[in-house]
Image (tube, helix red, strand yellow):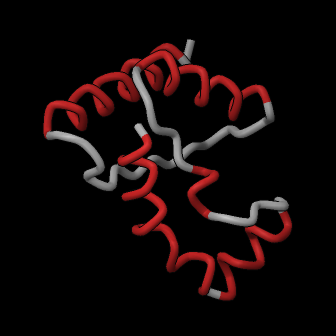
Amino acid sequence: MARARDRAAQQMDRYSEMPAYRALLDRENISDPVELAVIGDEQIMADAVARYAEAGADELIFALTALGSARDEERTWALLGELSRTGRD
């Protein structure tokens, strides 16, 4: 997971330089955009989605950044699809 987080940090670094994103990060007291990345297995992802919902988020947008294998991406999209279906109940 450390390598994936390093790759995410490299890909997300540019957001800290964009004024609109920097302002958003500052308002949320986030020093590094990679703090927003959720990297891990299905349980880690499901727990993160639940935390966002518990915090009051009513819409989440996920973007994959090709940090893992194609199979990893398939698993992530499958899980997010399942979570979106169960979240509507």
Q: In this rendering, is residue 52 above or below 33?
A: above
Q: Which image quarter: residue 65? A: bottom left
Q: Is the N terminus in the top left, top right, bottom left or bottom right quadrant?
A: top left
Q: Residue at x 61, y 51 (%)?
A: 36
Residue 40: where, in percent of width, then height? 44, 30
Q: Residue at x 65, y 23 (%)?
A: 50
Asked whether, in this view, residue 69 is left or right of residue 86, the answer is left
Residue 28: where, in percent of width, then height? 82, 59
Asked whether, in this view, residue 70 is left or right of residue 59, the answer is left
Residue 70: where, in percent of width, then height? 14, 39
Along the line of sight, the residue nearer the viewer: 9 or 45: 9
Outermost front residue? 2
Q: Is the C terminus in the top left, top right, bottom left or bottom right quadrant?
A: top right
Q: In this rendering, is residue 29 above or below 49?
A: below
Q: In this rendering, is residue 86 above or below 23?
A: above
Residue 41: where, in percent of width, then height? 40, 23
Asked whether, in this view, residue 51 is left or right of residue 65, the answer is right
